């Protein structure tokens, strides 16, 4: 019975994989032929099955870019970077896409630690840092075993020293992973999808308008009340925006 279930699962997985490959190939062909809206529909069929990847989001961003839809373009490029922060093609295209956005917001100066975190540590996502933790844990374990079974004193010293160094790297990478996860969860990033929207000083329509945002601007969501989101810009400005006019990048 277990073998039969396994075979059925294997067949279902294979068929699903073939269907996704077919959808992806069909969407790519539509994109090449300039049928960008049709390509988006095919890509989104894959997305709806939760079979997402950096390449899928990258292609979605490219399709929206061809249609001059700034908000979705930046949104999907940012989603692609979340899955693969080292994807240079996405980074390059995102630079061009941001030039289409109307809001030019100056970022507040960062401390040395904040710059180090952004320029180096955030090059990897917290999931990728978790892989680094696993690698160092396996390495440290292997070196400890080699130390235990080694007969030559000089080798024992080498294995002991390298295992301690690996353990230090393990603890460090674990700390970085936790911080990156906490940072990602705390900083709920969203992209403005409304062509133009007013940001107010309170979560009501009759409250004072403090500034205006346009499609494609990145914001950090701090709080939520009914159908309103409290947001923060990179220049430190705060305000409330209608929830439907932004779209969260984070998966939680």
Image (cartoon, rainbow, N blue to C red):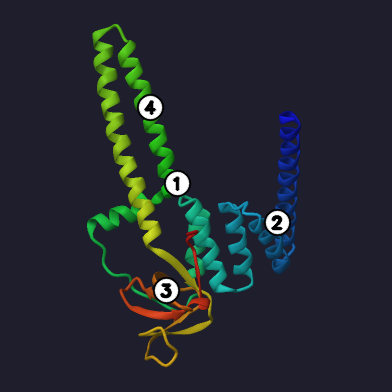
Circle nearer the viewer, 3 or 4: 3
Residue assigned mark 4: 139
What residue appears at the point 41 percent right and 48 percent down from the top-left corner? 126
Question: Can residue 204 be spotted in the picture?
Answer: yes
Q: Residues within 10 Å of mark 2 (few under 14, many from 20)?
A: many
Q: Quadrant of the N terminus?
A: top right
- Bin the neighbour count of mark 4 within 10 Å (Cα to Cα): few under 14, some 14-19, many 20 and up: some
**Where's residue 135, x and y in %?**
41, 33
Quadrant in the picture for residue 30 = bottom right
Q: Is residue 71 above or below residue 94?
A: below
Looking at the image, is 174 positioned above or below residue 143? Answer: below
Mark number, residue 224 = 3
Image coordinates of residue 76 in percent, x first then y, are: 55, 63
How far is the residue under mark 3 from the one under mark 2?
38 Å
In the picture of the structure, the residue carrying the numbered disc 2 is 28
Which numbered disc, 3 or 4, marks the residue that appears first in the sequence? Answer: 4
Q: Which mark is residue 135?
A: none
- Of callouts 3 and 1, the N-terminal one: 1
Indicate which disc, 1 or 4, sits on the residue closer to the N terminus: 1
Earlier residue among tags 4 and 2: 2
């Amino acid at each position: 019975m277990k073998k039969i279930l396994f075979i059925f699962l294997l067949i279902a997985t294979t068929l699903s994989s073939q269907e996704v490959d077919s959808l992806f190939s069909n969407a790519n062909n539509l994109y090449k032929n300039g049928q960008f809206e049709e390509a988006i529909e095919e890509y989104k069929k894959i997305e709806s099955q939760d079979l997402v990847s950096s390449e899928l989001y990258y292609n979605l961003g490219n399709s929206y870019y061809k249609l001059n839809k700034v908000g979705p373009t930046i949104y999907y490029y940012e989603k692609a970077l979340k899955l693969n922060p080292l994807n240079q093609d996405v980074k390059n295209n995102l630079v061009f896409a941001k030039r289409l956005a109307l809001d030019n917001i100056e970022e507040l100066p960062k401390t040395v630690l904040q710059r180090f975190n952004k320029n180096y540590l955030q090059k990897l996502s917290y999931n990728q840092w978790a892989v680094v933790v696993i690698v160092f844990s396996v390495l440290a374990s292997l070196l400890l075993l080699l130390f235990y079974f080694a007969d030559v004193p000089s080798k024992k010293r080498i294995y002991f020293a390298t295992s301690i160094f690996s353990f230090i790297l393990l603890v460090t990478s674990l700390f970085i992973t936790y911080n990156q996860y906490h940072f990602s969860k705390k900083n709920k990033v969203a992209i403005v999808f409304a062509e133009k929207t007013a940001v107010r000083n309170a979560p009501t329509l009759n409250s004072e308008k403090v500034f205006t945002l346009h499609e494609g601007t990145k914001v950090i969501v701090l709080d939520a009340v009914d159908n309103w989101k409290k947001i923060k810009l990179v220049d430190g400005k705060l305000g409330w925006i209608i929830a439907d006019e932004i779209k969260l990048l984070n998966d939680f």
